[in-house]
Image (tube, rainbow, N blue to C red):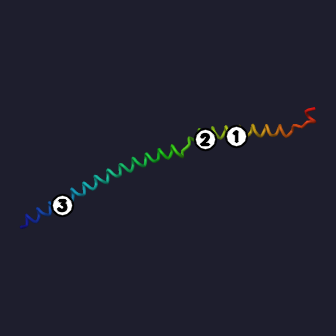
Amino acid sequence: MGSIGLRNAVDGVISTQARLGTAEGRIATVKARNIAEEAAMGIRFNELAGVDQYEAALKVAEIEAQLEAALVTTSRLTSLSLANYL
């Protein structure tokens, strides 16, 4: 009887180890999938919301130059008068 009980116990341990291995495999698969999805979402977020800092700096400089030109033009227009023209 002792060897049968021991055999049943060993079989139970082996069965438990097999189920544990299966669960670990599923966890590893889900973890890998989550990592891939996180990377894809990060890339998509950068496409939607991210702006290249160099590109943004160039755009800001361009807008500043346009604003400065508009202010110079406005300043010149306000200094014009019909008396100065004649």
Picture quarter with the N terminus: bottom left
* SS of the residue under disc 3: helix
Which label number is shown at residue 56? 2
Q: Amino acid at mark 2?
A: Ala
Q: Nearer the viewer, mark 2 or mark 3?
A: 2
Crowding at dot 3, Cα within 10 Å, few <14 / some 14-19 / many 20+, comes out as: few
Of residues 41 and 25, which is closer to you in this image? 41
Which label number is shown at residue 52? none
State left or right for residue 10 relative to residue 59: left
Residue at the (72%, 40%) spot, across then down: 67
Residue 51 in percent (x, y) is at: 56, 43
User: Real-space Cα distance between discs 2 and 3?
Assistant: 62 Å
Measured along the vertical axis of the image, is residue 78 above or below residue 28? above
* SS of the residue under disc 2: helix
Picture quarter with the C terminus: top right
Q: Are marks 2 and 1 in contact (CB under 8 Å)?
A: no
Question: According to the image, label 1 marks what residue?
Answer: 64
Measured along the vertical axis of the image, is residue 85 above or below residue 31? above
Q: Amino acid at mark 3?
A: Val
User: Real-space Cα distance between discs 2 and 1?
Assistant: 12 Å
Q: Which corner quadrant of the image does residue 58 belong to? A: top right
Measured along the vertical axis of the image, is residue 32 above or below residue 14? above
- Name which of mark 3 and mark 1 comes first in the sequence: 3
State left or right for residue 46 relative to residue 65: left
Question: According to the image, label 3 marks what residue?
Answer: 13
